[in-house]
Image (spheres, coloured by chain):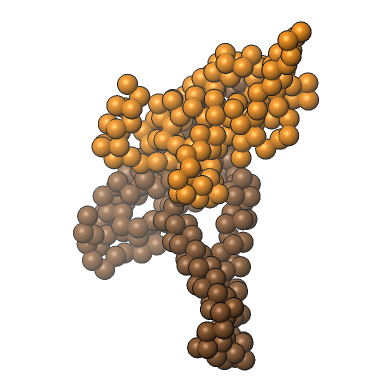
Chain colours: A orange, B brown
């Protein structure tokens, strides 16, 4: 899903050369920032993403679509997530938007024009899974 | 990945595996495989069924992501971008909340949008000892509270249709 466009972001150029960042890299940054938010159970990469993960390849860019503007200075992000039951979805989504925007702008220097969050499902977790996830975050 | 998709994926892998084994046996000219193939091809049905099943599963996996992307959603613009909550997500929330209500044994949920907010339709199969009026009132209250609390969407109505009564008490 990620890096579907042929464009890459060119974030710097000078006497020494240019710096380009692949869409896949931006997607991974966005995916990591999104899954770090409390209330996000998983990213939703559809059936194909699920098959890829079952084959053993952890896809950090799952559920992320990047659109880089033709001038390669701006980008917009589409994220598909599965929310956790018990959290307020608008608050979770707003936190994702802020976190993803901050992470991409901070790490790449690109301007993020939009972060669209698609909530495609709800996960009902057991207490044990909650504890494991909380521990992983600490 | 859902249980259904997992089962389909395994079935698909098994069918492709069996097909590949068959081809290998044919290429190696193993006599029983050749004889069986001649019989199946003459009859025609076996090959047709195999191809239809493999094709159907392949189309299901290839087309399903496109269908998913076109699902309806509640959209809100926050300035930073859009938040889209799929109807399926709200249905899952309503279902989860409704299943907690005493007397509900099975149910189907349906969501619609109207100018005043969203309208939830619940079709319920109740337990034999359930007080249907009390159950219905509780369903309306719980479902609208959970949807409002989780999504901040306005709920204009929750319609409950008691479609049936179970013959036995649930075991949960």
Q: Nearer the viewer, residue A101 or A56?
A: A56
- Seen at 59% across and 78% down, the residue is B27
Instruction: Name which residue lies at 55% across and 90% down.
Output: B35
Q: Residue at the far top: name it.
A: A15
Tell me if residue B134 comes above or below residue A75 in the rendering. below
Nearest the camera: A59 or B143?
A: A59
Q: Quadrant of residue B113?
A: top right
Name the residue at the right extreme.
A70
- Rendering coords of residue A123 (x, y %): 40, 41
Given residues B26 and A126, the one toward you in this image is B26
**Location of the C terminus of chain B (image quadrant):** bottom left
Q: Residue at x 66, y 17 (%)?
A: A110
Exactly how many numbered labels are in the figure? 0
Q: Residue at x 50, y 88 (%)?
A: B32
Q: Is residue A87 something one can see in this rendering?
A: yes
Residue A77 in the image, given as x and y percentages of width and height: 62, 28
| On screen, residue A54 above or below A100 | below
Q: Position of residue B81 (x, y in %)?
A: 62, 25
In the rendered image, is residue B129 in sight? no
């Amino acid at each position: 899903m990620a890096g579907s466009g042929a464009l890459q972001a060119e974030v710097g150029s000078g006497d020494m050369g240019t710096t380009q960042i692949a869409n896949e890299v931006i997607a991974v940054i966005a995916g990591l920032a999104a899954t770090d938010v409390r209330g996000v159970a998983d990213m939703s990469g559809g059936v194909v993403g699920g098959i890829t993960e079952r084959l053993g390849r952890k896809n950090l860019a799952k559920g992320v679509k990047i659109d880089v503007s033709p001038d390669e200075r701006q980008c917009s992000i589409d994220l598909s997530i599965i929310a956790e039951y018990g959290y307020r979805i608008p608050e979770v989504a707003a936190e994702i938007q802020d976190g993803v925007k901050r992470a991409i702008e901070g790490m790449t220097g690109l301007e993020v024009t939009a972060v669209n969050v698609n909530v495609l499902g709800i996960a009902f977790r057991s207490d044990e899974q909650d504890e494991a996830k909380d521990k992983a975050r600490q | 990945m859902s249980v259904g998709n997992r089962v389909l994926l395994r079935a698909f892998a098994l069918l492709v595996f069996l097909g590949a084994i068959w081809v290998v046996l044919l290429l190696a000219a193993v006599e029983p495989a050749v004889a069986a193939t001649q019989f199946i091809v003459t009859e025609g049905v076996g090959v047709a069924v195999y191809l239809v099943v493999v094709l159907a599963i392949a189309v299901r996996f290839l087309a399903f992501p496109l269908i998913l992307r076109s699902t309806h959603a509640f959209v809100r613009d926050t300035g930073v971008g859009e938040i889209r909550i799929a109807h399926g997500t709200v249905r899952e929330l309503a279902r989860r909340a409704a299943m907690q209500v005493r007397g509900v044994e099975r149910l189907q949920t349906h969501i619609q949008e109207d100018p005043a907010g969203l309208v939830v339709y619940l079709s319920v199969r109740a337990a034999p000892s359930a007080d249907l009026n009390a159950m219905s009132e509780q369903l309306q209250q719980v479902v609208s509270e959970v949807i409002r609390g989780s999504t901040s969407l306005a709920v204009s109505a929750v319609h409950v249709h008691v479609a049936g009564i179970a013959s036995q008490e649930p075991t949960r």
